[in-house]
Amino acid sequence: DIQMTQSPSSLSASVGDRVTITCRASQDINNYLAWFQQKPGKAPKSLIYGTSSLQGGVPSKFSGSGSGTDFTLTISSLQPEDFATYYCQQYNTYPLTFGGGTKVEI
Amino acid sequence: EVQLLESGGGLVQPGRSLRLSCAASGFTFSSHAMSWVRQAPGKGLEWVSAISTSGDSTYYTDSVKGRFTISRDNSKNTLYLHMNSLRAEDAAVYYCATPISPAAAAGRLDSWGQGTLVTVSS
């Protein structure tokens, strides 16, 4: 199985900050990497697929990059609605696997 | 607009069975692979199972193999998860999810339902 290691597990930031979350796969996942945002009590929301492609309606302050085994999610200017937990996920092979999550707090 | 509506969750005793359903609308259900993902209280996301468009191919995480069965009824636009021999560690919110396009990779989880809660306790 492909292991997804996300870091940090939590971070504190302020409105307006630039935030970067990293995700490392245990083997090459051919850029089949997605990022999700989840708020308490809500279903996850897909932000990015294919490492860097934004889902429709997702603001451009979110961006994804990386290749091979190392990937990043960047939020360019944190806003109050961005405080949430973020997950990466590989969909290169079954079983699909998620990172452990990064909680972004004020 | 893609809509996924899970149902069937509830309180069940350890060792008993439960069947979850996911009613799909707003897209051509029979053209989309489907997945179940769960989230235990206060924990992260865990993929559980997936099924191909026809139902011929199914996939499971190791911890549920032999106990859970994924299936679909394309005539009813409905996905199922039959859960047998339930354990305390199966307690979670269960979500169904799907790619937004039939052309997308099967494991791309673009659209999600709101989830249904399964509680396993005596």
Image: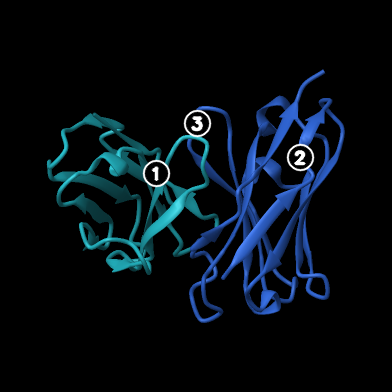
Chain colours: A cyan, B blue
Residue A99: assigned label: 1
Q: Amino acid at mark 3?
A: Lys
Say whether residue B76 is left or right of residue A40.
right
Q: Secondary structure at mark 1?
A: loop
Give the x, y percent position of residue A24. 29, 49
Question: Share a chain, discs 3 and 1?
Answer: no
Say whether residue B24 is left or right of residue A27.
right
Give the x, y percent position of residue A47. 36, 58
Residue B9: assigned label: 2
Mark 3 = which residue?
B43
Say whether residue A55 is left or right of residue B63.
left
Q: Secondary structure at mark 3?
A: loop
Kindly indicate whether the residue at mark 2 contacts the one at mark 1 (C-beta within 8 angstroms): no
The residue that appears at 68% across and 55% down in the rendered structure is: B5
Quarter-wise, where is residue A34 in the image? bottom left
Please report, as a chain letter, where disc 3 is located. B
| Label 1 vs label 2, nearer the camera | 2
Q: CA distance from mark 3 to mark 2?
A: 18 Å
Q: CA distance from mark 1 to mark 2?
A: 26 Å
Looking at the image, is B78 positioned above or below residue B41?
below
Looking at the image, is B39 positioned above or below residue A49?
above
Q: Amino acid at mark 1?
A: Gly
